[in-house]
Amino acid sequence: MHLILFFIFAGFCLAGAINLLLQSHPINSALSLIVVMSSLAVLYLLLGAEFLAAAQVIVYAGAIMVLFIFVVMLLNAGREDRTLGSRAASVLGLPAVVALLAVLATLFLRAQGLGSASISQGLTTTEELSKVLFHELLLPFEVTSVLILIAILGAVALARAGNGSPPPGERTAAK
């Protein structure tokens, strides 16, 4: 059963990554990235890494993706064009679904010797993981957080009307 779930969520992860690349609208790309991050969390769960799965959902699929969507929405402050959907989804969607269902049907019909996953004996505790993260890797951890903060501030500065110049209604003659 673990192998079947692994293949299903690996397929979701790959489909989300391909959809991320094929989308023309940045919000749809960010939502596809959320699918990828959530699928990775399920894969971590299947591998027995519950802490990494929880961190994946809380940090990446939760906080970071909310910030990405917020920044994208700030940068795309103009009027959106309505589309009928992705061209790639309309052309490749039905054949891809048929192929996926055929692979899953073949997998389920031959499911006698799938095997099982087991957790290794050398488990790492959350305490050991936190010691590595906050002692040995503290500098890269903090540098990453500062870089994300700088990127958000830069996006907000770019999203201002006219890049810092006053709005057209407030211009006065300086002469």
Image (cartoon, rainbow, N blue to C red):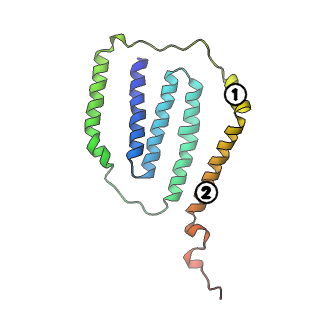
Q: Which mark is residue 154?
A: 2
For the point 26% across and 26% down, which residue is it? 102
In-image side of 19 versus 169 (left or right): left
User: What is the spatial separation of the Cα atoms under label 1 and label 2, in whole angstroms?
Assistant: 31 Å
Q: Is residue 152 above or below residue 175?
A: above
Residue 2 falls in image quadrant? top left
Q: Which residue is mark 1?
A: 132
Sequence-first tag of 1 and 2: 1
Give the image location of residue 31, x and y in percent.
45, 44
Q: Residue furthest bottom?
A: 175
Secondary structure beneath label 1: helix
For the point 69% across and 41% down, which residue is it? 142
In-image side of 123 versus 68 (left or right): right
Q: Residue furthest right?
A: 135
> Is mark 1 in CB contact (under 8 Å) with mark 2?
no
Secondary structure beneath label 2: helix
Q: Which mark is residue 159?
A: none
Give the image location of residue 35, x and y in percent.
45, 38
For the point 31% across and 53% down, which residue is it? 84
For the point 38% across and 60% down, which residue is it? 81
Quadrant (top left/top right/bottom left/bottom right) for the N terminus: top left
Residue 103 falls in image quadrant? top left
Give the image location of residue 13, x and y in percent.
43, 33
Give the image location of residue 128, x and y in percent.
69, 23
